[in-house]
Amino acid sequence: MEVGKTRTRWPGPTYSRVVPGASGRVLVVDDNKVIRQLIRVNLELEGLEVVTAADGAECLDVVHQVRPDVVTLDVVMPRLDGLRTAARLRADPRTRDVPLAIVSACGHQEVEAGLDIGVDAFLAKPFEPAELVRMVRQLVERARGGGRQRGSGPEAGGGSDAPAKEHEQEQVKEVDLPAVP
């Protein structure tokens, strides 16, 4: 028996299952396999097609083949974190309009940085599966309705999305900011 040696497979295989008649495709990016599976199962039960990636680098490797309607990102991940991944997705003309959601135990700094980058929604861990599904469905509907309106950031509003964006920002304040001890 060898002590101190571990076997790792890096990166883990990307999960993808074609769902006939799916109502949208979501790329779920999280380094925690259990969280990826939890999100995947809940979204697939709602008729969404889900592809998973173990970190931001893997996300960037597969996003152009997957062509998701929505990308969910954890913040703290190895190799490339969620905020840097979001910034790269926003900088790429092929993915700049794909709705992005941070699903993470994030604090005020991460929320502010995410808003500056152009993240569309935030969901704090731990989360209720119904909240996850509702958020993703709203983002899929927005993506299928012609994409995001780009301004100087998500707070810029624009078009018919303005009330939805205001509502999302209220949710950030209520749901995503941890209580200060």
Image: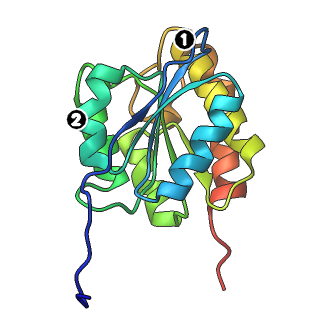
Which quadrant of the figure contains the N terminus? bottom left
- Cβ–Cβ under 8 Å for marks 2 and 1: no
For label 2, the crowd category at 10 Å Cα-Cα, with few meaning under 14, some 14 to 19 and many 20 or more, is: few
Q: Is residue 79 visible?
A: yes
Q: Residue at 41% of width from left, 38% of height from top?
A: 118
Nearer-the-camera pick, 7 or 16: 7
Amino acid beneath label 2: Asp
Residue 21 lies, with reference to residue 167, above or below; the image says above
Specify how the rendered protein is coloured: rainbow
Image-quadrant location for residue 81 = bottom left
Q: Position of residue 25 (x, y in %)?
A: 50, 22
Residue 115 lies, with reference to residue 160, above or below; the image says below
Give the numbered dot on residue 8: none
Q: Earlier in the sequence, mark 2 or mark 1?
A: 2
Amino acid beneath label 1: Arg
Q: Which residue corresponds to mark 1?
A: 144
- Secondary structure, mark 1, is helix
Q: Position of residue 46 (x, y in %)?
A: 71, 27
Image-quadrant location for residue 163 = top right
For label 1, the crowd category at 10 Å Cα-Cα, with few meaning under 14, some 14 to 19 and many 20 or more, is: some
In the image: residue 24, left or right of residue 126: left
In the image: residue 50, left or right of residue 80: right
- Secondary structure, mark 2, is helix
Q: Position of residue 49 (x, y in %)?
A: 54, 24
Q: Is residue 103 visible?
A: no
Tell me the distance, in whole angstroms, between the alpha carbons under discs 2 and 1: 23 Å
Q: Residue at 52% of width from left, 63% of height from top?
A: 106
Q: Which residue corresponds to mark 2?
A: 61
Nearer-the-camera pick, 63 or 49: 49
Q: Position of residue 176 (x, y in %)?
A: 63, 58
Which quadrant of the figure contains the C terminus? bottom right
